[in-house]
Image: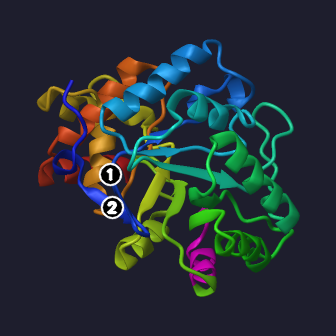
Amino acid sequence: MPELTEESAGTVTLGDMKVRRLGFGSMRLTGEGVWGAPDDPEAAKAVLRRAVELGIDMIDTADSYGPYVAENLIREALHPYPDGLVIATKAGLERTGPGEWPRNGHPDHLRAAVHGSLKRLGVERIDLLQLHAVDPKVPLEESLGALIELRDQGKIRHLGVSNVSVDEFDRAQALTEIVSVQNRFNLQDRDTEDVLEACTERNLPFIPWFPLATGDLAKPGGPLDQIAERHDATPSQIALAWLLHRSPVMLPIPGTSSIEHLEENVGAARITLTDGDMAELNAAAA
């Protein structure tokens, strides 16, 4: 299995950290509904170790995955972390049950969340801490203010934001240096394309979550299926390749609990889509 390389995937820069343009998302390493532990924790840790072996140097997680389960698995599988591996986590959501994600951007909650993540990940400083979502009950400036204080104290290296509008992105950048944005974005769901365009213009990494959603586009005989056949690839690989071709600042983080699917995802970085392929996919998803 060919490893992910700078040549195959390209790179983006998160502040002063250069990473390859295909990361790994840890959400699917938890139990059903992103709640509790996985059925086979050792298999989950094997996926994490294989991701690093394949050349992935950015792992995305959050305190709310499990909750706490994904961060603990990352530490158990990979600590002490190899040089150059970036661990990005998030704070700002709570969990009240499977599929339930209430927002909490109160400064006290964020401070406690960051200190909890530091302990679970086994680090003195978090490489990238992303505000998981803006809490409508708390001004964005107050939430980010708490995280800026923690960064100034040396607990956080860089700050990012997630699930934001262009206006919220602008407000965050007016407060401090923001090195990344993580929003839902995929071939079928482009509701935050304006945020992607803003990131592209500002040369800031855009991290699409839920990157492999394809819906009817991947049905037998559909456009994804046809293009995949032409490239001797799978529809999921073409969906990832489309993201990588869509913008030079794109940093997809497909997640899986399967080593086989992980290796398939890494293979997507070696697919070169033609202008015709891109036009066909763009038109099909319009």
Q: Give residue 226's position: percent from left, percent from top.
A: 20, 31
Quadrant (top left, top right, bottom left, bottom right) of the C terminus: bottom left
Is 270 magenta? The answer is no
Residue at horizontal 76 percent and vertical 72 percent from the top: 146
Q: Give residue 40's position: percent from left, percent from top.
A: 60, 12
Q: Nearer the viewer, residue 151 or 231?
A: 151
Closer to the N terminus: mark 1 or mark 2? 2
Amino acid of disc 2: Val
Quadrant (top left, top right, bottom left, bottom right) of the N terminus: top left
Q: Give residue 241's position: percent from left, percent from top.
A: 27, 44
Q: Residues within 10 Å of mark 1 (few under 14, many from 20)?
A: many
Q: Which residues are magenta?
A: 162-173
CB atoms at circles 1 and 2 under 8 Å apart? yes
Q: Residue 29 occupies which quadrant of the picture? A: top right
Residue assigned mark 2: 12
Residue at horizontal 59 percent and vertical 34 percent from the top: 75
Label 1: state its secondary structure. Answer: loop
Residue assigned mark 1: 21
In this picture the colour scheme is rainbow
Q: CA distance from mark 1 to mark 2?
A: 6 Å
Q: Horizontally, is 233 left or right of 163 in the view?
A: left
Q: Nearer the viewer, residue 57 or 61?
A: 57
Residue at horizontal 74 percent and vertical 79 percent from the top: 141
Amino acid of disc 1: Arg
Is 172 magenta? The answer is yes
Q: Is residue 224 visible?
A: no
